Image (cartoon, helix red, strand yellow):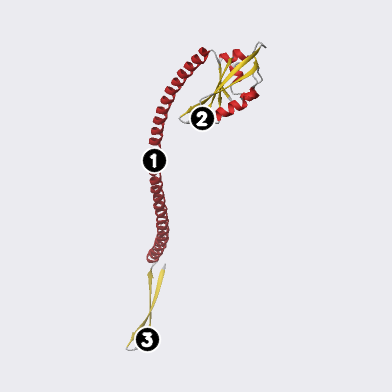
């Protein structure tokens, strides 16, 4: 590429003509174009770098927020672990208490079994029919002599309301006797003699003694002793 330069020729204040010169500016133009292209590329790169920087700032803010959330979660987990440790200690303590209670209950169970066996032996050797009623007049104990006297087995009698029994003993005539014992009106025990029919169908005179059952000043029921008069 040629660059034409026209220059006026002046002598003593008069224009005598003009001078024309030619210069090859191809290399200069190419350098200028490359410079312009480089500047544009730098501008694009700068814009991309600025955009990348903004994205990095946004990512950094998100990471910082996530880190704060993780710290909060870690604190919550630590608090939960402490609560679980406390709960575990409480459960361990409760288990130890339950184990102690179970040992105590097993011991008391053996003691109760021993007492029941002793009472069963005593009731058997009394030679008297015995019925133990709770405060609702339901049968809790019905010994062998009662079974032999009226023909009603213990597993049939126990749990039944005494006044609903259909046996040879006229239970309706014992209502006042039982009520007196259960209300605590009787001093010691009360006795009533009634006509009855034993399991063999034989008429008999039956003497019924009602004895209130008290424990620590609380009335727990009544024991009825039934024997042939």
Which residue lies at the image location 51% right of the left edge and 15% below the top edge?
A: 123
Q: Position of residue 86 (x, y in %)?
A: 38, 39
Q: Is mark 1 in CB contact (under 8 Å) with mark 2?
A: no
User: How many residues crowd mark 3 within 10 Å: few (<14), some (14–19), many (20+)?
Assistant: few
- From the image, tell me which residue sits under label 1: 81
- Left or right of residue 109, residue 157 in this image: right
Element type at marker 2?
strand
Of callouts 2 and 3, the N-terminal one: 3
Between residue 84 and residue 29, name the one nearer to us: 84
Q: Secondary structure at mark 1?
A: helix
Residue 98 visible within the image: yes
Query: From the viewer's perspective, is 81 left or right of 120?
Result: left
Residue depicted at x 48% and y 16%: 117
The local secondary structure at tag 3 comes to strand
Image quarter of residue 139:
top right
Q: Give the residue number, with chain letter if any, for mark 3.
A: 15
Name which of mark 1 and mark 3 comes first in the sequence: 3
For the residues marked 1 and 2, what is the alpha-carbon distance in whole angstroms?
52 Å
Q: Which residue was labeled with disc 2?
A: 219
């Amino acid at each position: 590429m040629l660059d034409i330069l026209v220059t006026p020729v002046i002598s003593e204040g008069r224009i005598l003509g003009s001078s024309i010169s030619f210069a090859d500016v191809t290399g200069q133009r190419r350098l200028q174009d490359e410079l312009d292209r480089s500047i544009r590329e730098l501008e694009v790169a700068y814009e991309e770098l600025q955009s990348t920087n903004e994205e990095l700032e946004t990512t950094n803010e998100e990471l910082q927020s996530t880190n704060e959330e993780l710290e909060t979660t870690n604190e919550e987990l630590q608090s939960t672990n402490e609560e679980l440790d406390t709960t575990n200690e409480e459960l361990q303590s409760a288990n130890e208490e339950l184990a102690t209670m179970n040992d105590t209950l097993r011991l008391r169970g053996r003691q109760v079994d021993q007492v029941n066996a002793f009472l069963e032996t005593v009731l058997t050797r009394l030679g008297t029919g015995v019925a133990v009623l709770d405060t609702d007049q339901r049968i809790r104990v019905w010994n062998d002599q009662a079974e032999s006297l009226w023909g009603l087995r213990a597993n049939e009698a126990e749990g039944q309301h005494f006044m609903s029994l259909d046996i040879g003993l006229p239970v309706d005539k014992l209502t006042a006797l039982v009520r007196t014992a259960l209300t605590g009106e009787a001093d010691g025990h009360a006795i009533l003699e009634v006509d009855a029919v034993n399991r063999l169908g034989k008429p008999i005179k039956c003497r019924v003694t009602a004895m209130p059952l008290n424990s620590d000043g609380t009335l727990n029921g009544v024991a009825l002793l039934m024997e042939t008069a």
